[in-house]
Image (cartoon, grey):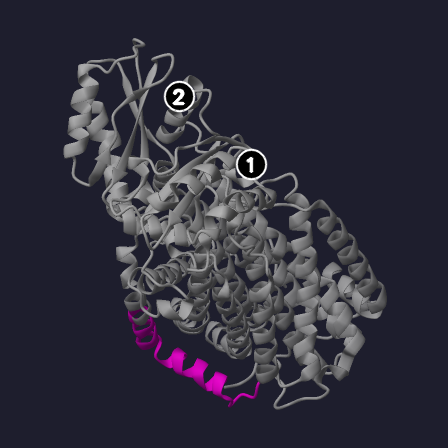
Amino acid sequence: MTLPPPLAPPLESSTLSGLARWGQWCATRPWRVLVTWLIVLAACSSLASSLHATFSDNVTLTGTQAYVGQSALIANEPSTAASTGLIVFTSASPLSAQASVLTTATTALAGVEHVTSVSRALSSATTSRDGRTSYVTLGFDVASRALTHRVVTQLDAALAPVRAHGVHVAYGGGLDIVTQPSVNDHASEIVGVVVALIVLLVIFGSVVGALLPLLAALVAIAAGLSLLNIVAVRIAFGASAPKLAAMIGIGVGIDYAVFLTTRFRQLLRDGESPARAAGLTTATSGRAVLVAATTVSIAMVGLYASGVTFIGQLGLGAVFGVITAAAGAVTLVPAVLGLVGPRIDRWHLGRVVAETGTSGDGWHRYAGAIGRHPWRYLTSGVVVVAVVALPAIFLQTGHVGDGASPSSYTSRQAYDALARAFGPGVNASMTLVLTRTSPSRTSSAAESNLTATLARSTGVAHVSAWSPSANGRIVVANLVPATGPQDARTAALYTHLVTTVLPQGLAGTGDRGYVTGPTAFQIQFDQLIGSRLPLIIAVVAVLALVLILSVFRSVYLALKAALLNLLSIAAAYGVLVAVFQWGWGRSLLGLRENVPVEAYVPMLLFAIIFGLSMDYEIFLLSRVKETWDRTHDNHLSVADGLARTGRVITAAALIMVSVFLSFVTTDLVAIKQLAVGLAASVAIDATLIRLLLVPATMFLFGERNWWLPRWLDRIIPHLSVD
């Protein structure tokens, strides 16, 4: 295969683009840029550490069925606790022998900070049949996320005599937020960085070349995480936000730096000076990075279209890592490239990688093979991806609660003890609230009949008697399902209660029935997220479609990118189902049981994958378009673009997969799922999609790759990666 003209024809300094001049300026003043970054990083880190921002999952489902029921409960029962927690007692012998010490301890619990109520110890309703397990419920005057570790210290002090008598004590319910170990241990980030360094050394064969993109990315991501902590003082980000921002930021940050480094090496080989090579690198690969980062950011911010602030803010949190990674790529990276210059290949361990190989190398032969048999490669690639995506048909979303936490967590111990003693449904209890049109202190016939109907309903283990409020405007009952909170049958029971049992039981009375409580809120959240996923898919896909149209001026390329990205995402969903729902290899992730996919993970995964997929798409297509603009030979352009980018895309994908998989060491199951889904998607996208299906379809499209109707050309904005 004949190689096309050089990457960039000689240009006078005056003809360099603004971005090229900027990159050259950074390269000729490297110390000024480095010092500026270090000052910014030090200032942001210092401010962030002084503000002590907190991250917690605070979801408000205003207007939903569970929310209205809870509001009615609070309005008519002013003593209703803002949040509750459970203290579970277990012993090898009946707890009745320790009745005195338990009573004394529960009395002392009333003096703990923020505690407003304590249920009676060893009551028949909260003690197992064998008498070896019992629990008390604490009411707090603040939300669980507002409790501090000082509360846990006081609880420990009050319960010390109980433990001294050989009774095991575990904290559950709303106390899990404050008792679980902190997830901000940075172990995952450290593992990811070490793995990335090893991969960089093996692939790029140069110590300096491996350290340069890694260090530049780390400085930029550290600044981004500090900014996230500063903003978190004002915006309530979810508990997963820092890990998510670090995972995405480290992955794209290293990839962006790798893209620039390989282009810089190639320009040095083509005879450019270090400063000029850094400028041209910034103008080409740097511009592609900015477009790619914009795509990822748009996809993440597009999560606000879900209408759920919690989800939108998780996406916004990830944007901090992406933006600072892109900023570092077009400032810090060219500065360091200019500083090291030809010394970038010093201390090499093997063959140093740049973009362009020889006309007979493996990548050029591979590109030629696809060009000769595009249908064969296209068909085989689609079949493989479809097989991987097939399990996605069985995707089941839900909440991964305390039952999937490590056994060392006190909340997991409480969960297991309650399930063993009272059945799995005790961890999924729901509160039934009936609002009356006529206040009364006695139960009506309809309410009595409703109790009988509830007791006979499939999936109900127990339902308590109705308890009227002091003003008689509402009655409340507690319902215990026969299944646990992660079981799909529990969600089905909730839906049956809301849509059938309560409306039919109260028909003609004018009263309204609601199902509320933590389990009900979680199920409504899951259902709401599921109903909004099609909207997010449409919004993100359209935004990405417009971006590709604006950059590459091609209807075929834009539609092809959207469709293939959807195929890549379906494959990622398939992997999640196989690993987490079916348990294929779950023990390697530290999970003891199959779990559903966390409700918001598919939506978040879609936005992230769609954005990251565009990284490789833009990087590949920008090289194809460079050759097309010079030769107008579609076959040569596609083959050369694939040959130039194949080794770089493969290396960058391997780095990103390694970084993502390092995050499976975290205890947060949602982060494990995101890590596995992202790693699978990137691996599939960078190999089967980007290096097989994309070139095969472009070979088949021919010159139609570059077709755009004149009317559409006039109305869409013009962007460039050149």
Q: Quadrant of residue 351?
A: bottom right
Circle 1 packing at 10 Å, graded few (<14), some (14-19), many (20+), is some
With 205 as the anchor, is 40 left or right in this view?
A: right
SS label for mark 2? helix
Q: Which residue: 53% across, 79% down?
A: 647
**Residue 245 spot, x, y in % from top left:** 58, 55
Instruction: Check if mark 1's residue and mark 2's residue have beta carbons within 8 Å.
Output: no
Residue 364, above or below 132: below
Q: SS class of the residue under badge 1?
A: loop
Q: Is residue 172 left or right of residue 251?
A: left
Magenta span dominant secondary structure:
helix
Q: Which residue is mark 1?
A: 112
Count every numbered label the image shows and give the total. Answer: 2
Question: Image point 69% across, 61% down: which residue?
Answer: 220
Q: Nearer the viewer, residue 3 or 119?
A: 119
- Amino acid on which disc 2 is placed: Ala
**Marks 1/2: CA–CA distance:** 28 Å
Residue 613, given in percent of the width and then of the height, sits at 48, 62
Pointer 2: what residue? 72
Q: Nearer the viewer, mark 1 or mark 2?
A: 1
Seen at 46% across and 70% down, the residue is 686
> Which segment did they paint magenta?
357-383
Residue 579, position as x, y percentages in the image: 34, 65
Task: Specify the amino acid type for callout 1.
Answer: Val
